[in-house]
């Protein structure tokens, strides 16, 4: 089979996009939250699943999610376990949007996606990549606690060996200091990285890395993930010129419509990424990516390939580097098979109820 060409081959090596510098953050208010369906209806539709991972990812071996069903289809509520209710409530807004309101109209029929390589040893890279089939881009996890820069270099080198023409980005999940990030990017320079995602934990640090890379004439771009996802003000990173690219997960921003509005106001190129969800949650990410006016990079939405189960017979997994824009049919027998235990079910229903109250309190009256 012929290799899938990168949708934007000229971006290999991180050439900055033609987005005008400093043209961002309009003062337009974000749209009002969507009306909430009655809580009893939401709870009655809820199903809790527990899905094993094929490879450990961000310390997770089993991913839990609560699925809800409304008139528009299914929605997924799966904030990470350590998130508190205030941080988790927008995830519920996203699930309710999917199930009760549906998604905005797409402007494309398929979305380019990257393979995602967790912080595995170099010897395991080829096996992980094989799960994604042909892809034009790969995201590689780096800066894992307990590992060294040499481990990262070996992992990235192995990706480059297996896929000589792929765009490569790396994700440090804020694991480096500014100094460590600059050293690591020096060491990884020869691989032609598109961008480095969240090299350091905070916004001033991101800005410092970005400015120093420019001063040194290194073309790699800086992308923000946690600095958008876990901020009270998701626009701050753009306002402070701390990143070239935004990595956006729809659920923590309150769903597809609100994420679209935030990206529009930020005025920066966006990459849509998964929250390690089942195909139901991935469908929302695909809806966001499909509705964006510009989609210059492959999206991190192929993560169902890292999971050992799903709630549908037709998972949203890449076909020659793309996910199709289509709905997901949930299979009852798969829900049964992946059903979480009673204690976890109760835990998730309690969390759902508390988050619903947070959203209800924020509704325009
Ligand atoms: O972006 C991708 O390629 C896959 C998704 C991904 O990397 C993530 C999904 C869920 C949790 C995150 O820690 C992680 C990320 O940091 O982007
Ligand atoms: Mg990330």
Image: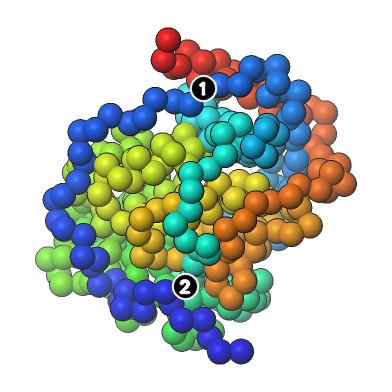
- 78 in relation to 59, above or below: above
| Extreme-bottom residue of the structure | 2
- 351 in relation to 213, above or below: above
User: In this view of the protein, which residue sits in the foreground, 13 or 213?
Assistant: 13
Of labels 2 and 1, earlier in sequence is 1
Badge 1 crowding class, 10 Å Cα cut-off, few under 14, some 14 to 19, many 20 or more, is some
- 50 in relation to 131, above or below: above
User: Residue at coordinates 82% horizontally, 28% vertically from top-left?
Assistant: 342
User: Residue at coordinates 74% horizontally, 35% vertically from top-left?
Assistant: 48
* Mark seen at residue 241: none
User: Residue at coordinates 44% horizontally, 39% vertically from top-left?
Assistant: 257
Badge 2 crowding class, 10 Å Cα cut-off, few under 14, some 14 to 19, many 20 or more, is many
Query: Marks 2 and 1, how far apart in space?
Result: 38 Å
User: Residue at coordinates 46% horizontally, 81% vertically from top-left?
Assistant: 5
Residue 12 position in % (x across, y down): 34, 77
Residue 23 visible in the current orientation:
yes
Circle 1 residue: 35
Residue 78 position in % (x across, y down): 61, 38
Residue 32 position in % (x across, y down): 39, 25
| Extreme-top residue of the structure | 365
Question: In the image, 89: left or right of 213?
Answer: right
Residue 79 visible in the current orientation:
no
User: In this view of the protein, which residue sits in the foreground, 326 or 67?
Assistant: 326
Circle 2 residue: 137
Question: In the image, 108: left or right of 307?
Answer: left
Residue 43 position in % (x across, y down): 71, 23
Residue mark closest to the camera, 2 vs 1: 1
Q: Quadrant of the N terminus?
A: bottom right
Dot 2 lies on which element? strand
Dot 1 lies on which element? loop
Q: Quadrant of the C terminus?
A: top left
């Amino acid at each position: 089979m012929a290799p899938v060409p990168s949708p934007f081959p000229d971006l290999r090596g991180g050439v900055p996009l033609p987005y005008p510098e400093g043209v961002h953050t309009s003062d337009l208010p974000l749209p009002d939250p969507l009306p909430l369906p009655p809580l009893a209806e939401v709870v009655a539709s809820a199903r809790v699943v527990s899905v094993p991972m094929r490879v450990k990812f961000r310390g997770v071996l089993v991913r839990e999610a609560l699925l809800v069903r409304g008139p528009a289809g299914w929605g997924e509520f799966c904030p990470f376990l350590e998130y508190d209710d205030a941080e988790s409530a927008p995830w519920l807004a996203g699930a309710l949007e999917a199930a009760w309101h549906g998604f905005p109209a797409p402007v494309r029929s398929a979305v380019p996606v990257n393979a995602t390589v967790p912080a595995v040893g170099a010897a395991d890279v080829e096996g992980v990549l094989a799960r994604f089939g042909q892809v034009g881009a790969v995201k590689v996890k780096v800066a894992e606690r307990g590992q060294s820069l040499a481990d990262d270099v070996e992992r990235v080198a192995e990706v480059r060996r297996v896929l000589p023409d792929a765009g490569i980005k790396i994700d440090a999940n804020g694991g480096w200091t500014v100094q460590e990030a600059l050293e690591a990017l020096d060491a990884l320079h020869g691989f032609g990285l598109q961008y480095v995602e969240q090299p350091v934990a905070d916004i001033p640090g991101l800005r410092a890395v970005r400015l120093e890379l420019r001063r040194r004439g290194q073309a790699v771009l800086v992308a923000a993930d946690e600095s958008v996802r876990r901020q009270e003000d998701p626009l701050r990173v753009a306002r402070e010129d701390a990143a070239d690219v935004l990595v956006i997960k729809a659920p923590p921003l309150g769903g597809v419509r609100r994420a679209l509005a935030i990206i529009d106001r930020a005025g920066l190129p966006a990459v849509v990424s998964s929250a390690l969800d089942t195909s139901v949650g991935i469908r929302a990410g695909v809806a966001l990516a499909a509705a964006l006016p510009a989609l210059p990079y492959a999206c991190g939405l192929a993560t169902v390939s890292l999971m050992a189960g799903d709630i549908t017979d037709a998972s949203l997994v890449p076909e020659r580097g793309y996910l199709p824009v289509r709905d997901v049919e949930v299979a009852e027998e798969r829900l049964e098979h992946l059903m979480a235990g009673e204690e976890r079910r109760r835990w998730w229903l309690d969390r759902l109820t508390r988050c619903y109250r947070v959203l209800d309190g924020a509704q325009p009256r």
